[in-house]
Amino acid sequence: MPTRLTIIGSGPGGYVAAIRAAQRGARVTVVEEAEVGGTCLNWGCIPTKTLIASTDALELARSVADYGVELSGDISYNLQKIRDRRDKVVGTQIKGIRALFKSWGVDLVPGRGSLISEEVVRSVRKDGTTQDIRSDRIIIATGSRPADIPGLPFDGNSILSSNDAVLMQEVPPSILIIGAGVIGCEFAFLYRSLGSSVTVVEMLPRALSAEDEDISALIEKELKKAKIKLITGARIESMKRTTDGVTALLSNGQEVRTAKVLVSIGRALNTEGLRLGDAGLAAGKRGEVPVNDRMETVVPGIYAIGDVTGIMMLAHVASRQGIVAAENALGGDVRMDYAAVPAGIFTRPEIGSVGLREHQAREKGIKITTGTFPYRALGKAHAMGEIAGVVKIIADAGTDKVLGVHICGAHASDIVHEGALAITMGATAKQLGAMIHAHPTLAEGIMEAAEAVHRNAIHLPREGK
Amino acid sequence: MNPDDIKYHREHAWIRVEGKNATIGITDFAQQQLGDIVYVDIPEAETEVDADSELCEIESTKATSPVISPVSGSVLEVNEDLEDSPEIINEDPYGNGWLVVIAMSDPAEVNDLMNRDEYEKFLKEEEER
């Protein structure tokens, strides 16, 4: 008899785990209360990148004259058509997952999943009807949701969550974005392109504080160039709704009045209502389900993956965790390794980063050497008209092994994967710099930055000159 | 042609003194070295600046370079036209391409700066080095 595996949640963790488990011969049931694809497909990665593709087209249209192209008439956009395109793209991806489920024989059960015992998952539908699913193995993949500021709940009207912002019901004349993390910065450029006046307030001393400092510095300059106001080192002291919007008082004494507020301060984990205790589990301090590197919880046969584990909030990490959990649930022995996790941030220009940041090296006492190379020294960047950017490579000072690759510039999220491979394979900066890179490409920046680790970059002037 | 009614700093900034205030810009040599200027990270009014330290940053298609202030003081006025048209610096470095007006805190610092002939001699020496 095949192993009965039940997965709660069908985001990029859950649906990938479902397919892998089916490939390994399990009888798979997925419980999903909303649409397949989770936050990533319905509220995050895909719809935001679709909206950003529209604003990229808009920005290109605004700058065609720089390329010798002549357009007549005003450049404008149709918000309804931008939303329709987003919905079409998301719809296609949803159909794709459903088709894969069908092809692999995965059962999709609508309803909100909870644990009744170590081997029973209950699905509760909106109409109250329930279905109990007997399971040999269970994977918890319930994800996360936008976190609000205590006392300032989202209202979908003047105080928006990232989910509200993705809906893009309107383009406000002005917006205050609280939190200069990934979501805050992406939406800052998005709203700015659509014509909003944007102010971003960040509690920490720099934007994108999880990134390398050089990347933060570059994006802060690009925010400034885009006329987005960034206020760092300030908290929201109080906020009140007015007839035409919201007035926020900051801890530095400044007052910011805007039509709307987007709160992007982080995400809360979805463990409430999951009845973890009924299966012998307990949530951690942040509401996370603790797991080991095999994605096992403390209860044998129950696994957790994705945001709900509180490890790394990235769709592709959830997918890998899903594969690891599925393999292990079906007799395999696979472990998670987080040494080389690339990530993209879709600001303008975009960011791709993987591995160690310079501040992390300092905190951990790792001796490093770094090499940086500007996009403006690449022929391809000039040809494309995309000269803002930098590639930074961090190598171990002793072994020369590549420990981190950080890129801010056009197509950074695509070209960063060479860095992920270098880290995974234990390549040295010398090897990376000696590898022939095609000309003219943006990837040459990685070769040059690797050479710059040893002060050998061909297209940089001698230091001090 | 470098004007002779202004003073020059060895980091290729110029200043035109009017009483206690000084207008600051970059020299023709500096703009030629930079190439097409695409962005000036112009400081805000009231920013305090020290002589021989960074006043602002200029980005060109070739490089990002700091502008070194020839004198100490506080920024009184900034050239807001540069925000949308930074290329004015390439076109008219000693005129419309000025950067800021500074209220000098130590006007005597001006005495340390070069006049036109000294600056041109300095450029020649730099070139030959």
Image (cartoon, coloured by chain):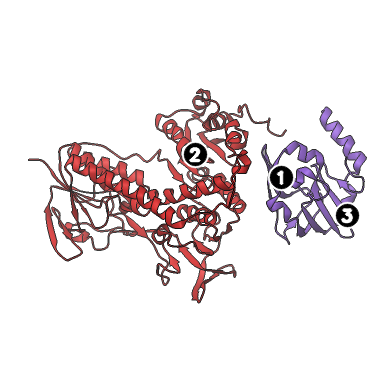
Chain colours: A red, B purple
What amino acid type should be assigned to the residue bearing mark 3?
A: Val
* Local SS, label 3: strand
- In depth, the one of A291 and A110 nearer the eye is A110
Chain identity of mark 3: B
> Are labels 3 and 1 on one chain?
yes
Sequence-first disc among 3 and 1: 3
Residue designated by label 1: B66
In the figure, residue A196 lies in which quadrant? Answer: bottom right
Task: State the CA–CA distance, disc 1 to disc 2.
Answer: 27 Å
Residue B109 picture location, percent across and down = 86, 52
* Local SS, label 1: strand
* Local SS, label 2: loop
Residue A245 picture location, percent across and down = 50, 72
Residue occupying image coordinates x 69% and y 47%: B57
Task: State the CA–CA distance, disc 2 to disc 3.
Answer: 47 Å
For the residues labelled 1 and 2, say whether their Cβ atoms are less than 8 Å apart. Answer: no
> Are labels 1 and 2 on one chain?
no
Which disc number belongs to residue A411?
A: 2
Q: Residues within 10 Å of mark 1 (few under 14, many from 20)?
A: some
Residue A85 picture location, percent across and down = 40, 50
In the figure, residue A199 lies in which quadrant? Answer: bottom right
Residue designated by label 3: B17
Q: Is residue B88 at least partly visible in the picture?
A: yes
Chain identity of mark 1: B
Task: State the CA–CA distance, disc 3 to disc 1.
Answer: 22 Å
B118 horizontally vs A378: left or right: right
- In depth, the one of A284 and B25 nearer the eye is B25
Q: Is residue A295 at least partly visible in the picture?
A: no
What amino acid type should be assigned to the residue bearing mark 1?
A: Pro
Depicted A17 relative to depicted A110: above or below: above
